[in-house]
Image: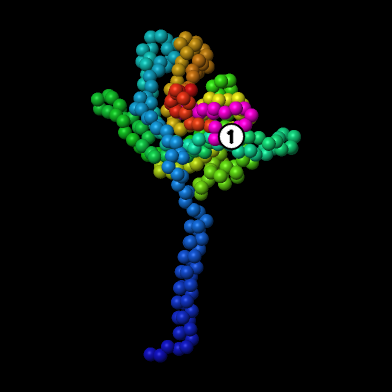
Amino acid sequence: MKSSPKLLVCLVAVVSFAFFGQIAAAQEEKKVKVAQPKGRPLAAGVLKSVDPEREARETYSRHDLVELVAVDPNFEWAKNVTFKHDVWSLDFKFKPIRMIWVDVPQPGGKMQRKLVWYMVYSVTNNGKAMHPVLGEDKTYKMTYVDKPVLFIPEFVLESHEFGKAYPDRIIPVAMDQIQAREGRGNKIHTSVEMTSVKGKPRKIAVGQTLWGVACWVDVDPKIDRFSVHVYGLTNAYYWKDEPGRYKKGDALGTGRRLLQKTLKLNFWRPGDEYYETEREIRYGIPGEVDYSWGYR
């Protein structure tokens, strides 16, 4: 059976189209890979790690139901009640505080040159949230579950000498400089971007790492010792009811304080107020711990 010239031409065209199509697809795939590079690793020791110090006792607490006891002190079942909940923790790493100068827009429309203190960090959800389960012997056994986490960060820089506190600021004009200087292929998020994507809550999946930055401006140049309090790295909490504060008829929760587990990072800046430079800032304070966990 002889093949017609037209049939041969069609077969050659089909084969050529498929061959060159594969080459084009491979080139396009290569472009995509180049356009989305993986973050470059930092040199050893650049990132400081913090132990989350998870404890089983964080999953439960015992409190009187003061609202019910105030109604009838004989409600024994409303006293020393056990409350339990799952507790997750994010792994936290950070780079020591650095500084950049930026022109910040003012309410009147003018620009003002400001020194921005900032700290780049990463959070990783390694899963294994603590999940207490009541056993047959009526005691709680600890199990572990993997779950996505909603991270709502808050960073407060507080001076030791003057008691001044500076909350984390969102400074859009500083982000390009910080990204170019610190990104290394990783997208750096503001505290707002950490919590949401296109108006929807952002949850960190198990195994996922996000990079962020906390910024502060107008920090007193006379500060020598200061701490950064980091909120949101865990959902561990407990509450305190001020004894005798709640009275029958008061609004629910009157006199109650909710305390969050918070990370405290200590820093030392042995410089002067006239020449501020990031090289003066050291992690840790002589004679004190580098970091600690507490409830605030």
Where in the figure is residue 119, as x and y percent of width and height?
53, 36
Where residue 258 appears, x then y in whole percent? 48, 22
- 252 and 14: which one is in front? 14
Q: Residue at x 44, y 14 (%)?
A: 66
SS under mark 1: loop
Task: Kindly identify which residue carries mark 1.
Answer: 277
Q: Provide residue 90's location: percent of width, then percent of height.
A: 43, 36
Q: Residue furthest bottom?
A: 2
| Residue at the farthest left position | 137
Residue 48 vertical position relative to residue 136 in the rendered view, above or below: below
The residues colored magenta run 263-280
The residue at 46%/45% (across/down) is 42
What's the amino acid at mark 1? Thr
Residues 54 and 243: in front is: 54
The residue positioned 36% from the left and 37% from the top of the image is: 128
Please report the residue visible at 47 percent of the width from the left and 65 percent of the height from the top: 26
Task: Confirm whether residue 203 shows in the render.
Answer: no
Pick the residue in front: 1 or 77: 1
* 108 inside magenta stretch: no
On the image, which quarter does residue 278 sit in?
top right
Instruction: Say how the picture is coloured.
Output: rainbow
